[in-house]
Image (cartoon, coloured by chain):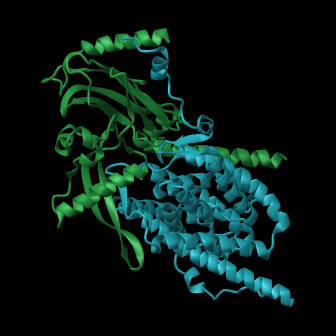
Chain colours: A green, B cyan
Amino acid sequence: MRALISSCLLALLALVFSGERAHATEFKNVLVTDVSKDQISIRSNYSGETLLLFGAIDTLPYGEVDGVVVVLRGPAQDITLRKKNKQFGIWINGPAYRLGDLPSFYAVASSRPLADLLPRARRAELGIGADVLKASNLDSAQNDPEQAEQEATQAFLRLKQSANLFAAQSDAVEIIREKLFRAEINLPAGMPVGAYTTEFFAFKDGALIGYQIGELPVDIVGAGHILHEAAYNMSLIYGLFGVALAVFMGWAVAIIFRRR
Amino acid sequence: MLVSRSILQKFFEEPAPPFEWLAIMLIYLPIAEMSANVMTLIGMGGLVGFMSGMFGVGGGFLMTPLLIFIGVPPAVAVASEANQIVASSVSGGLAYWQRRAVDIPMGLILMTGGLAGSYSGVQLFKTLRAMGQVDLLISLSYVVFLGVIGALMLRESIQVIIAARKGSPVQARRPGQHSWILRLPFRMRFRRSKLYISVIPPLVIGYFVGTLSAIMGVGGGFIMVPAMIYILRMPTNVVIGTSLFQIIFVTASVTIFHAVENQTVDIVLASLLMIGGVLGAQVGARVGQRLRGEQLRALLALIVLGVGVKLLLDLVNQPDELFSLTRIGVGG
């Protein structure tokens, strides 16, 4: 426990002196933050985990903060959304919408409802809240771009939420005695891999007074990693390996059962 | 101001992973990109293997829909199931090979057609996948084939059951003459089948079954065996061995083509299905020897029809979610 605290203190000091960040220019940064893990490893028995994001708030410059927001964002992806419609009596994939630059994973936790903290336009600027995410439409020629895009974006959010890849919790950041805060974000088993970013925001009277950003790599490790890499980079060898394994297993079982 | 010890403790405690005991049973499928329960997969392999051992059919046409029902992306289900069938047909085929119940030249010709068919099947698969229509292709193929085969099997077993009740012997079905097909050019002698026929019909049959294998993730024995008996008129003692012989090569090529073109073969998934499948098949074969009867065959027909009807209903009924999502460049 003592070692953990002292290492945390070291980390805090390192963060304090690590200079200024993107949003940290016009204010005295009140946030010192860390994450319970510096990387997420998806092993073959990975069933999801809970990530702890925590930090300290310096109350000297501005006093008590109004709220703290934590955002965990997965790598951006280009995706195709297809809508089914009924043709010849069956439901068939119809129009496709290609959307770019959308996060593959997005979790936001805050100490109060986001709407109470700051207006929607400001949230859109800072990228806080799944509802303000902006997709770049990759299809230039669409008949009714506005409505179609809106419908597609909503479907995207719905699909991501049902896959537990998008989550918003308005009371998930717990502020302890004005100075410490902690938030837990649930990582599902099927989370996409890549470079995630963690962002911490502190607000006072609608103004940003604290900001930290960090990286959190999420990787498949172990045998799963080797197979995943091989499948995409050495497809032929991977396929031959699959066949060899099957031939061996079929042969071995035939031999074993004949002996009986 | 000092923070009390209990708060600190709460603050730094490691959150316990939820359902830790269940995590032991879960396995991450690296290509399907999902977690599944090991016992579910082995159990499914075992159940389908048991049925295939008992009824003497390949299990692919039941396993692929089952995988789709538990949420494996259809493209991954098809390719991984082809990989599993390699194992089950090697395991089943060895016995026929040792009994010399394989017509090797015939098997090689069927295989040649099958390799070409599996290649074009995978190409069709790839093209439709890029258009977002491959799931439809898989579902429709299954609805048609499960429907037709289930209905034929059911009709035949009901006829046999009724005939047995009446006590009259069942007439062996004599198919119509297809001799002009077999008298096409490029004739060859097949010693073990005692045939002297054109190589064109087996090439065409092999091609057709190879295409189906690539699209549906099946061995295709359910088409191949009747085609060999009724069209090629091969003697029944070499039919199953020769069918298994070419299924090994065709499903192996389907696996490799899918791995190269679509990256949809999940070896972890396939291995778990293999373990269950080969064990289940051995048990099923033993049980089947004692229980073989037309009632069982009717039961299998009902299962086949049931799976087909479920797939059809999924196509006809309005889905809860009209949208589906794929990553550009990758995905299922």
Q: Quadrant of residue B309?
A: bottom right
Query: Is B324 drawn above or below residue B186 in the view shown?
Result: above
Query: Is A181 drawn above or below residue A105 in the view shown?
Result: above
Identity of the residue furthest to the left in this view? A26
Q: Quadrant of residue B217?
A: bottom right
Q: Looking at the image, which residue is at 35% across and 14% down?
A: A11
- Tell me where residue B236 appears, x and y as whole percent: 73, 72
| Residue B270 visible in the shown view | yes
- Tell me where residue B11 appears, x and y as whole percent: 45, 22
Left or right, A138 with respect to A173, comes to: left
Q: Quadrant of residue B85?
A: bottom right
Left or right, B265 with respect to A98, comes to: right
Q: Looking at the image, which residue is at 18% across and 61% down?
A: A146
Q: Looking at the image, which residue is at 43% across and 65% down?
A: B320
Left or right, A68 with respect to A46, comes to: left
Q: Which residue occupies the foreground of this view, B204 or B318?
A: B318
- Tell me where residue A29 appears, x and y as whole percent: 21, 20
